[in-house]
Image: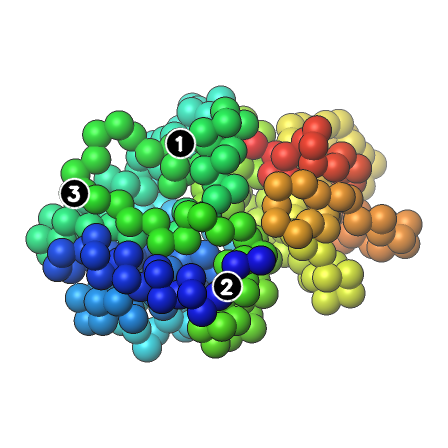
Amino acid sequence: MVNTEAFIERAVERIKREVKGRAIIAVSGGVDSSVCAMLAYRAIGDLLTPIYIDTGLMRAGETERIRETFKEIGLEIIDAKERFLENLKGITDPEEKRKTIGETFIRIFEEEARKREIRYLIQGTIYPDRIESEGGIKSHHNVGGLPLRIEFERIIEPIDELYKDEVREVARKLKLPTEISERMPFPGPGLAVRIIGEVTEEKLDAVRRANTIVEEELLESYKPWQTFAALLERGTGVKGDVRVHGWIIAVRAVTSRDGMTAEVLQLPWETLQRIESRITREIPNVTRVLYDLTPKPPATIEFE
């Protein structure tokens, strides 16, 4: 386990050394970017510009929650929902999807930096992101998903040597609120990697609503390390004596320490039945619900 006090001192000094002037911090609302924001603020104070990009790929109520949580540090919110959906149109390959999202993110940050004459970007890359991207498992949007040509003079990643559990330790040492330090992981590309194939408004609506139901049923009662819903493809079903070709939703719930490996939660049959019933009843265009029993490895936690 990391020595949190020593790490905080080292990270603050690193930011001071590498940032020569003002910097943008990419805020997502998760523990990784929140820790980076705290470290960066200690290092450069008011020279820091925190920016959150609303991709339209977030969970229900996510942008509003982030706006409220970070309102005191002058968080700027960029509405880029239409831009992300347009750029993702027609893309079905998981790697191309991740790289498209990564490039869209960086281009928006570059545009915001040009307006302010800022040359540095700080982001919350952690060690597993780098391992999976460099190892060819999958490109994280903030590592392997970045384009080769980037306008920033430097991208600073103060916590890129930490695992997720170590980031949480640092968050607690920094006295971040529990809802941030213990927050369940959420992928940078958002719900796009919980949709197999092309991302559309209809798919986003279905998976977002299903995800809300899964979190409501499992978060408090079972305390999973991560749980969510993913949208697979279409399957035939019957609703109201009418044949329906609706979406198939997969439910995922795992335990883990650092995200590098994961075991599946053994949920009671009654809980699984309740989740299935709610999803198929409350979301008209869903006809089938599955529970994913695959650990990591051989599967990854996210579907894409």
**Other residues around mark 1 within 10 Å, as few (<14) / some (14–19) / many (≥20):** many
Nearer mark to the viewer, of 2 and 1: 2
- Between marks 2 and 1, how big is the CA–CA gap? 28 Å
Q: Residue at x 78, y 65 (%)?
A: 221
Q: Is residue 213 visible?
A: no
Residue that mark 1 sits on? 144
Q: Earlier in the sequence, mark 3 or mark 1?
A: 1
Q: Dividing the image into 4 quarters, which one contains the N terminus?
A: bottom right
Q: Amino acid at mark 2?
A: Asn
Q: Determine contact: label 2, label 1, CB under 8 Å.
A: no
Q: Quadrant of residue 246?
A: top right
Residue that mark 2 sits on? 3
Q: Earlier in the sequence, mark 2 or mark 1?
A: 2
- Between marks 3 and 1, how big is the CA–CA gap? 18 Å
- Residue 253 horizontal/vertical position (percent): 72, 48
- Between marks 2 and 3, how big is the CA–CA gap? 30 Å
Q: Is residue 26 visible?
A: yes
> Which mark is drawn over residue 153?
3
Q: Nearer the viewer, residue 136 or 243?
A: 136
